[in-house]
Image: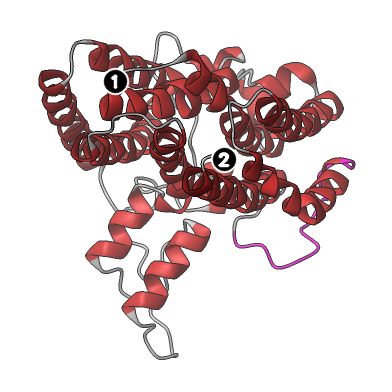
Amino acid sequence: MGIDTESSHAEPSLAKKWLYVLATTNPPKGHMDPVSKWLYLTRAGVFPMTLVSAALAGLLAIFRDADVDWALYALASAGILFAHMANNLMNDLFDIQVGTDREDYPRNLYSPHPVLSGVISKRGLGLLALGVNLICLAIMIVLTVARDFTIVGFALGGFLLSAAYTAPPLRLKKRGLGEPTVVVVWGPLMVGGCYYAATGTAPAAVLLASLPYAILCTTVLMGKHIDKAAWDGPDGTNTLPVLLGDSHARKVTQGMFVAFYASIAVLVATQILPIATLLVMLSYPLFKTVWVTYDSPKPAESPMPNPVWPLWFAPHSFLLTRRAGGLFTLGLIAGAIIGH
């Protein structure tokens, strides 16, 4: 059975359905059209993190006055977006195969699992993941022909880490290595890979410049794993928050927020990033709110309407990532225009 629901209310417009899925990663009310279904299956609500990584690569290239092939840059940006889709599909597939995702697990509570809810079969999900990975493979081949085999290193590195995140035998998430994986993928591999595709070079300064935002993205995963620790611990899924314990995990995540802001300040001081990227400091009011949230354990019930409950810390991290990431991008745009 599917998860479409009948309602006495008027059917929402397509635009409202798409926006709802993007905002909550949940299926919309009423009939689920093909676009809504695709956005839901691929968990498109978190794609802005990847789009920002792609934007960082292009803006850093302009700021550094590099010789850019914009067609290859656009293709590489599409490649990392498809890679993110494939990663989300594979995570759902492998987690249900190894028994992690089930009816009472948070993955099925904050957003119905596509297989458990009957939206798609396990075989269908596998075929969809295969199809998206084949698109990624085609993009990798085109970029490799246009550049060189360094592209393969970036692409395969991202694929292997994404697959190993949940897939046996490594299952990095189960060994406390999932969180460092996100730093590597959303930083040097995504930003560095797009930059290399666009310019044919991958300077150390660019790889360093990719780290602040990658750290910020990782706070979302830290928040999610803190939220899920009560389920993960008994299951033997030793995410970093499970290994650290609730209090230490929340403090480490707060330290990562500080590391984001501090690293941008250092990179500005060393002229690796433009001065305008200090615009991220305008996100301080939201940072203060999120900091206070991480000061206390997760409440027994959400004190506010929360469509992704039992997630609590993760959406707070995501809001800050979206705000600070947007300001970071604006700062890089300003830096690319004024040149410093």
Residue 39 on image: x %, y %: 34, 56
For the point 63% across and 45% down, which residue is it? 276
Check residue 8 in the rendering and tell me which mark sits there, or answer none.
Answer: none
Quick one: 253 or 58, which is closer to the camera? 58
Name the residue carrying label 2: 105
Residue 325 is left or right of residue 16, and the answer is right
Q: Mark 1 points at which residue?
A: 155
User: Residue 172, image x and y in percent?
Assistant: 51, 15
Residue at figure coordinates x 46%, y 68% from the top left = 20
- Looking at the rendered image, the quarter that the N terminus falls into is bottom left
The residue drawn where x is 74% and y is 54% is 282
Q: How far apart are marks 2 and 1 (CA)?
A: 31 Å
**What's the residue type where badge 2 is placed?**
Tyr
Q: Where is residue 122 in the image (x, y as percent from the top left)?
A: 27, 38
Q: Which of marks 2 and 1 is nearer the N terminus?
A: 2
Vertical arrangement, residue 189 with respect to residue 7, above or below:
above
Q: Residue at x 62, y 30 (%)?
A: 212
Q: Is the magenta stretch mostly helix, strand or loop?
A: loop
Residue range in magenta is 295-307
| Disc 2 and disc 1 in contact, CB within 8 angstroms | no
Quarter residue 209 falls in: top right
How far across and down, in percent of the image, does residue 257 sit?
74, 35
Is residue 1 visible in the rendered image? The answer is: no
Q: Is residue 82 left or right of residue 29?
A: left
Image-quadrant location for residue 200: top left
Scheme of colours in the image: secondary structure
Q: What amino acid is found at the position of numbered circle 1 in the picture? A: Ala
